[in-house]
Amino acid sequence: MTPYGARRRFAAARVARLATADTAGRPHIVPVTFAVDGDVVYSAVDAKPKRATALKRLANVAANPAVALLVDHYADDWNELWWVRADGAARVVDREDREAAHALSLLADRYPDFAARGAVLAVDVRRWSGWAASAATEES
């Protein structure tokens, strides 16, 4: 799968899994909604109830900005299987910054019920990679 094809497939997905790690290297993975703008993936803390306001993903990004995002498709017909990963460096964007407003607008366009409550996260993707079970699935 080409980087272009991987990014295109990633952008069309509805949910991704964000993988971060703390300073000790302990992994933390959470599902996120997102929007893609070129080689930047935006996510934001939404208004759904959370167990805590100090989210582990944000603490991990502050300590270790290296992250990965994964989207995938499963089907009982294994010829339709695929996954795409975006590896990059994450940063928290100040809510007052123009980039945050842009990110929130992109997210609201993708998810009509989206309501941001907290931090905006930007991942500057350094590598798009993926795999598909068949050439036909890879190109679609």
Image (cartoon, rainbow, N blue to C red):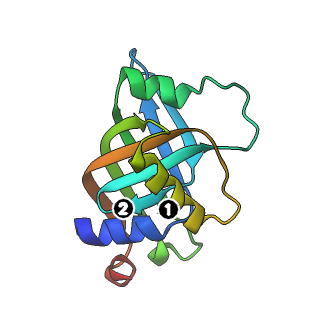
Which SS class for mark 2? strand
The answer to whether any part of residue 31 appears in the image is: yes
Q: Secondary structure at mark 1?
A: helix
Alpha carbons under labels 2 and 1: distance apart: 8 Å
The residue located at (58%, 47%) in the rendering is 31
Q: Residues within 10 Å of mark 1 (few under 14, many from 20)?
A: some
Picture quarter containing residue 55?
top right
Residue bearing mark 1: 106
Q: Amino acid at mark 2?
A: Asp
Question: Label 2 belongs to which residue?
Answer: 37
Three-letter residue code for mark 1: Leu
- Residue 88 picture location, percent across and down: 30, 43
Callout 2–callout 1 Cβ contact below 8 Å:
yes
Q: Which quadrant would the N terminus be assigned to in this image?
A: bottom left
Between residue 117 and residue 20, name the one nearer to us: 117
What residue is at 43 percent from the left and 66 percent from the top? 11
83 lies left or right of 109: left
Q: Residue at x 39, y 82 (%)?
A: 140
* Res 24 quadrant in image: top left
Note whether residue 82 is visible.
no
Q: Nearer the viewer, residue 55 or 21?
A: 55
Q: Is residue 80 left or right of residue 46?
A: left
Query: Is 51 on the left or on the right of 80, as rendered?
Result: right
